[in-house]
Each structure stands twice: as structure tokens, then as C-alpha cells.
Image: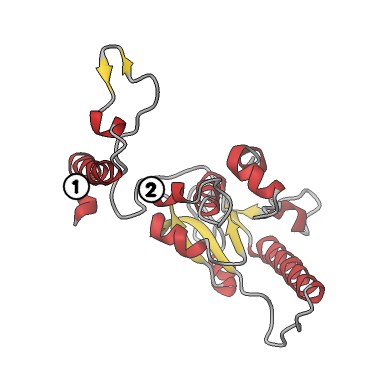
Amino acid sequence: MVMGGLNNSIIKRAMEKELISIEAVNIRDYTLDKHKKVDDYPFGGGAGMLMQAQPVYDCYKAVIGKIDTFADSTRSMEGEDIPEDGPAKTRVLYMSPQGKTFHQEMAKELSKEENLIFLCGHYEGIDQRVLDKIGVEEVSVGDYVLTGGELPAMVMIDTIARLVPGVLNNDASSVDESFSEGMLEYPQYTRPEVWEGERVPEVLLSGHHANIEKWRKEMSLKNTKEKRPDLLK
């Protein structure tokens, strides 16, 4: 599901250029249960099932081991010393409606990280003991409930990847987009100049870059006031 959604368009080209690498790992592959079971009933009762600690933790350790091996081999090829201060730095983001809400500034921060793990829960979530042991950061895409964490992970990966240098053909694109400066983007127009009797704003045809920039800032502010006044606070 995850790779099917991400292996397209801009993100696909970024992977082909080796600007980013993405790997989906199935937690079921790390269960000790012969039926590949990874969930059980929650202690104390209640509806639904809960993902068990063991397969999640074993999967996490395997992924960390792979990241460390890759980091060490990369350093060796580049003639760098392998550090003795432990594994490569990796942040683990747990997709959870209880987490802090994901936003553009968080995406900018995460785009500078070398390694990210997105932990996707299912059912009623994951045994709290393994979340505590790993030291996850809980992150949410909004105040609603989804079947699993895959869709939020895909949203975050897409947003973060666009901010990695070189991923967008024109890096200025990510600077001009909505939320990049805390406001919504200005309206955009393309050919033809007249469509259904409606003309493109004259200022955009003027070639006067200072006036165009001024218009765009004014329209960005107007859009934000009308559609998302909460952002202006």
C-alpha cells in the first residue's frame, strides 16, 4: 500500500535519482507466531485488538540494524571513520491521533534528518510498553480516526521529501507554496489569457516583477484572511 502510493511522480523520480530512499517493512515478518499473528485482546477489556510489543520491537531492531550497516558502509566508501558513539541517529515517528499535529514547519525540520522511521499502528494501536522502550514521537495528521497509520505516513513522507534539496526540479517551488511562510498561496493562472470570458489579472502579464511580487503578497494575505484566519494569529 505504502510503496504503491509513493512510487509515483515526483517521489518516484527522487528515489530513482537516489536523493531519498524509502522502504516499507512488514511487521508481520517479525512475529514468532506461526500464523503471522501480531495482535491480541487488550488487558482490561474493551473493543478491538492491540498490536503486540514483540513483533514491533524485533522489526524496529532489524530496521535500525540495516540503517547502521548502510551508514557504516557509506562512511567506509567515502573514507570516513566509523564513529564509536553508537548507531546512526534515527527518529521514530508513531502515527497516532494523540500526537502533535503535523505541519509544514515540522516537515522542514524532519527533511534535514538523515534517517526517519514511520511506525504505523492498526486496530486499537500498539502495546504502550514497546512505544516507551523505543522512545517514539507521536504525530497526527488531524483530529480524526483512520484504519491504520499507513495513509498518515504517506502524507508525511510526501511532504517531507519535497523539501529535500533536488527533489523538486525548481527548488523555489517549495518556497512559494502554501504554508511556507505561514500563509496560503496566491491564486495561479496559465494560458489562455481569456477563458470563459475571464481574463488573467493584468499585473501578471505586465512583466513588472516588483508589481507581480507585491500583488502576490497581497493576494496571499487576502486568501489567508478569508480561508484560514487562524493562521494569522
Residue drawn at (53%, 65%) of the image:
112
x%, y% of residue 69?
78, 71
User: In front of the other: label 2 or label 1?
Assistant: 2
Q: Which quarter shows the N terminus? A: top right
Q: Secondary structure at mark 2?
A: helix
Indicate left or right for 1 with 132 as reference: right
Image point (62%, 54%), residue name = 40
Local crowd size for mark 1, using a 10 Å CA cut-off: few (<14), some (14–19), many (≥20):
few
The quadrant of the rendering that contains the C terminus is bottom left
- When the figure is inspected, residue 213 is found, relative to residue 187, above or below; the finding is below
Q: Which quadrant of the structure image shows residue 68?
A: bottom right
Residue extending furthest front? 207
Q: Residue 71: percent from the left, percent from the top?
A: 73, 71
- Residue occupying the point 66% across, 75% down: 88
Q: Which residue is mark 2?
A: 176
Are the residues tagged 2 and 1 within 8 Å (C-beta)?
no
Q: Nearer the viewer, residue 194 or 15?
A: 194
Q: Position of residue 65 (x, y in %)?
A: 75, 70
Q: Amino acid at mark 1?
A: Pro
Residue 229 on image: x %, y %: 19, 47
Residue 75 in view in this figure: yes
Outermost residue to the bottom: 84
Label whose residue precedes the other's in the sequence (2 or 1): 2
Which image quadrant for residue 20?
bottom right
Secondary element at tag 1: helix
Query: Which numbered tag is attached to residue 202?
Result: none
Labelled disc at residue 229: 1
Name the residue type under label 2: Asp
